[in-house]
Image: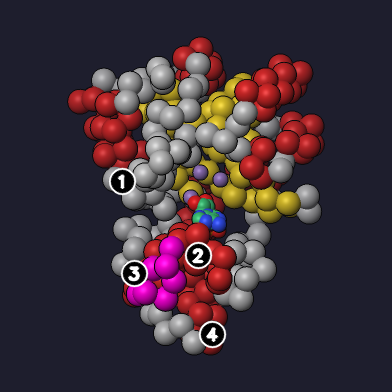
Amino acid sequence: MISRADLHSHSTASDGKLTPAEVVVLAASRGIRLLALTDHDTTHGYNEARAQAYDSNIRVIAGVEINTDSALGEVHLLGYFPDPEKPALQAVLSKIRTERLNRAEKIVAKLNTLGVPIAMGQVLAQASHQGIGRPHVARALVAGGWVASVPGAFESYLGSGKPAYVPRYAFAPEEAIRLIRSAGGVAALAHPVRSGSEGHIPALVEMGLNAVEAYYYDHTADDVARLREAAQRYGLLCTGGSDFHHNHSDGRRGLGSVWVPEEDGERLWEALNL
Ligand code: AMP
Ligand code: MN
Ligand code: MN
Ligand code: MN
């Protein structure tokens, strides 16, 4: 399958397992010509990715994924930036990351009460940056032999409603969209099918949404067609990507496993004036 753009990927700057440079090298080797690094709540992987891109014949866009909660459920937003070094943007992302660290401490405390003697240091050992999340706790639980697998850790402890669950720092979709737009960025709704957020598109458009992730690893052809139609109706760009975190043995969510038409990538590139 020819893959030209992948606009949703994670690195060690958040919960991915490859460094930003490694993500770029892998993307280039899979035939991707345009890559967006969209780590959770940080753009800190961008400079390393950008530097590697010169050697790898690939273009890189600075991005971020911000997970928000609304009365209607989880809404994950992707931000794409012409230049992520805007003080107002970085200040808010830094605040969200600080709150992630606070939350990890609370999760560890809950686990200790539940009889799992995990230490914060074991969790931090799984994360190379402070963009810490439940996947790092899950990996520490696996490493310590308390659970058999990462999905098992979510099932037994970390998932919503499970005994060690701690909610994220409350951030609303409208705040995230405003933050992205005021930094000159493009705001896209991530994986609307998986999040069950497709029905919120009209409301999110009112809040300033610019794009929808029409292409995603678990989207059927029907999903793609429906989301492309919605994009046309609301004047949104179409984005898409693999949501790559690491290499899965079954090849799902691999870089280049999602086909994003080149013209959609180019439209995003142009919208960012790059
Ligand atoms: P957080 O942002 O810390 O709440 O963690 C959310 C991240 O955890 C998501 O972006 C996924 O990468 C991962 N995740 C969520 N649910 C699961 C699950 N059931 N199994 C494995 N990973 C999950
Ligand atoms: Mn993730
Ligand atoms: Mn997401
Ligand atoms: Mn993601």
Is the residue marked 3 within 8 Å of ligand 1, measured from its CB?
A: no
Residue 145 falls left or right of residue 29: right
Q: Is residue 83 above or below residue 69?
A: above
Q: In the drawing, what numbered circle is on residue 114?
A: 4
**Residue named by callout 2:** 152
**Residue under pointer 1:** 18
Label 4 – label 2 distance at C-alpha: 16 Å
The answer to whether residue 26 is left or right of residue 172 is left
Q: Quadrant of the C terminus?
A: top left
Query: Where does residue 85 sit, x and y in percent of width and height?
Result: 42, 40
Q: Nearer the viewer, residue 75 or 241?
A: 241
The answer to whether residue 74 is seen in the rendering is yes
Q: Earlier in the sequence, mark 3 or mark 2?
A: 3
User: Which badge, 2 or 1, comes first in the chain's sequence?
Assistant: 1
**Mark 4, residues whose alpha carbon is within 10 Å: few (<14), some, or many (≥20)?**
few
Q: Is residue 68 above or below residue 258?
A: below
Q: Which residue is mark 3?
A: 143
In the structure shown, which secondary structural element does the residue marked by tag 4 occupy?
Answer: loop
Please state the extent of the stretch shown in magenta in the rendering. 142-149
Q: Where in the figure is residue 14, as x and y percent of width and height?
A: 41, 52
Q: Earlier in the sequence, mark 3 or mark 1?
A: 1
